[in-house]
Amino acid sequence: MAGRKAYDVVIVGAGAAGLACALEAARGGARVLVVEKDHRLGGALHLSGGHLSAAGTTRQRARGITDSVQAHREDVVRISRGTARMDLVDVVTEHAPSTLTWLERGGFACAPETPRIVYGHEPYGTARTVYGVDGGLSILAVLEAELAAVREAHELEVWTDAPVTELLTDSDGRVVGVEAQRRGAEVRAHARHVVLATGGYGAAPELFEELEGSTLVSAATRTATGDGLYLGRAVGAGVQGRGTHLPTFGGLPDPVTPGRASWEERQLLTAERAPWEIYVDRAGRRWVAEDEASIDEKERALTRVPDLTFWTVFDDAALSVATGPAQLIVGREPDEIRSMANRRAGVHCADTLTDLAVAAGIEAAGLVATVDRYNAAVRAGGDPDFGRTHLPAPLARAPYYAIRNHAITLVTFQGLDIDAECRVRGEDALVIDGLYAVGEVIGAGATCGNSFCSGMLLTPALTLGRLLGARLAA
């Protein structure tokens, strides 16, 4: 077995959390090693929209926006319905403004329209979400520039293409390093502190099935294979966030890879367009008011749909008006959707509802009965089943269309249990000496609860990572 070098801090994972932690630890004088299994740095930043949230910032004040840390905290409580870890939320919201300032000093290219209120999920009451002109890549640009500067002046080493296979422990159970595969050899790196920053399990079907009890359809980064959870649980780490999982609402099936969805071809949400379509399950039954204003409520309803699979059903009249800002699918005009029908996986078209059901895999009698009942509701001006109020037209003009959707996973909600100082805790709730965790490996449920709070995934990753790095250096 090759190698046995000692460090103060070994960080597993070179995404936002891991790099932020490494930079602060090295600047504080620690000897730092970052071990990344991918050939590139950045992790989920390559796919992320890069949303951050912070209250009372210079950017808000320059636009006349009044905000406070307490208001940010209260919005998280409201949106998560009190299901987030408030000890962590308190830390993140308090230090989020300094995280944003740190990025801006590093040259962060902030999108000029921000801060703004984002309506993709339950919105904040105040405009406090910011993001870069290139999404997550704008953040990665800052981190890579900082990394180059710190490596010149401090002891910071980075390994890529080096998957960690084991946490090393001593006779007392303290974590004292890692074992990794590097350049065809097993290498051990010993350290006083080991930080897991490996991301989630959005590309780990077996682990997802174990933790969430359902089939994974993913739009997450392909490197999110649950490594940190496997490593942590192997030394007795506990898991937090059970019951907080919330799927993301819809995405076309990936045309090439089973079990994945194309996030770039998602449906525009209710907050962005008024729906003319209906949603049905495999039996052809509606399951929610399609004009429900709360995306979280629609996604919670989706968790009760068999197989988490549904179809968006509409007629040619509905498709004809789905243009411009009212597009049914992001970036797709009506004629583009027509050309996809019966050619692209999950997009079906037929001249009758019965034939549409057969092609799509929906129970035909159920679909015909549901459309008849919906059309009657349109004529009556009221929906007795779900209370839908936007009833613009019956589904009556052939051809008819059905687009198959599945609850998709962008981020994962369970993760390693930590205390407020990011120390990993065992199943007995006691701290595992020498082991820490930051980023999605602690689970989105830690700082979002059973919800999606704008910016409360990436902001905690950077903020808790920076705070932890400074503590470990000290």
Image (cartoon, grey):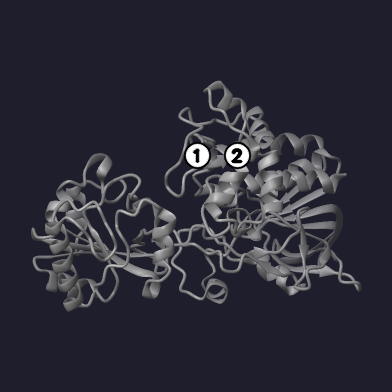
Q: Tell me where residue 161 appears, x and y as whole percent.
A: 65, 58
On residue 174, the disc is none
Quadrant of residue 338 within the rendered picture = bottom left
Disc 1 marks a residue whose amino acid type is: Gly
Crowd class of label 1 (few under 14; some 14 to 19; many from 20; radius 10 Å)? few
Furthest residue in direction right, as rendered: 171
* Percent x, y of residue 396: 9, 60
Q: Nearer the viewer, residue 109 or 244?
A: 244
Q: Amino acid at mark 2?
A: Ala
Pick the quarter of the image with the C terminus.
top right
Q: Position of residue 103 (x, y in %)?
A: 64, 33
Q: Is residue 456 visible?
A: no
What label sits on residue 71 in the rendered view?
A: 2
Q: Is residue 398 left or right of residue 430?
A: left
Q: Are marks 2 and 1 in contact (CB under 8 Å)?
A: yes
* Circle 2 SS class: helix
Vertical position of residue 159 compared to residue 131: above or below = below
Where 28 falls versus 197 (above or below)?
A: above
> According to the image, label 1 marks what residue?
125
